[in-house]
Amino acid sequence: MDKVLSYLGLARRAGKILFGDEILENFSRGSISLLFLAKDISPKSRERFAKKCLYYKVPLIEDYSADELSAALGRPIVKTAAVCDHGFAKAIQKERRCVDGKEQKTI
């Protein structure tokens, strides 16, 4: 498991992760700092979450499959996961830049 997924698991254990429709409800509250979408999410769901990310200026990561997200978060079939802590989000984005050597993809 890479460091990004390790940080994601740590955020889960700290109670700073939201899943599914909980995420949509929390966008307007400003509590979403970073969003993970599985590569294999349905196009309709991807569009719905991506539009929210664009509107609320939330960074979006789509580099992992549902199986990888599920393993990192210890839950079955995770297609969406939102980080609700600025510190965890910042650490994850910093790690992605170190690994990828490029800037974070934001929709």
Image (cartoon, rainbow, N blue to C red):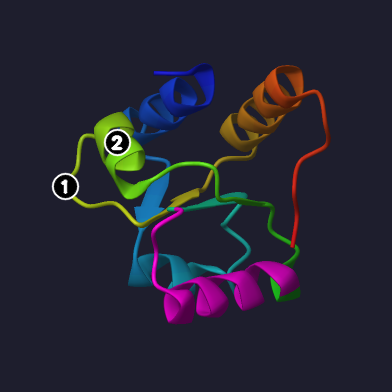
Would you name the residue on which mark 2 appears? 73
**Segment colored magenta:** 39-54
Quadrant holding the C terminus: bottom right
Residue at coordinates 52% horizontally, 48% vertically from top-left?
84
Q: Nearer the viewer, residue 86 or 69?
A: 69
Residue at coordinates 57% horizontally, 57% vertically from top-left?
31
Q: Nearer the viewer, residue 37 or 92?
A: 37
Would you name the residue on which mark 1 appears? 76
Q: What secondary structure is marked by label 1?
A: loop
Horizontal placement of 91 versus 41: left or right? right
Circle 2 packing at 10 Å, graded few (<14), some (14-19), many (20+), is many
The x and y percentages for residue 32 are 57, 56
Q: What secondary structure is marked by label 2?
A: helix
Quadrant holding the N terminus: top left
Tell me the kind of residue under disc 2.
Answer: Leu
| C-alpha gap between disc 2 and disc 1 | 9 Å
Q: Quadrant of residue 65?
A: top left
Q: Nearer the viewer, residue 53 or 26?
A: 53
Horizontal placement of 13 versus 44: left or right? left
Whether 48 is among the magenta residues is: yes
Q: Is residue 3 above or below residue 64?
A: above
Q: Is residue 61 above or below residue 8?
A: below
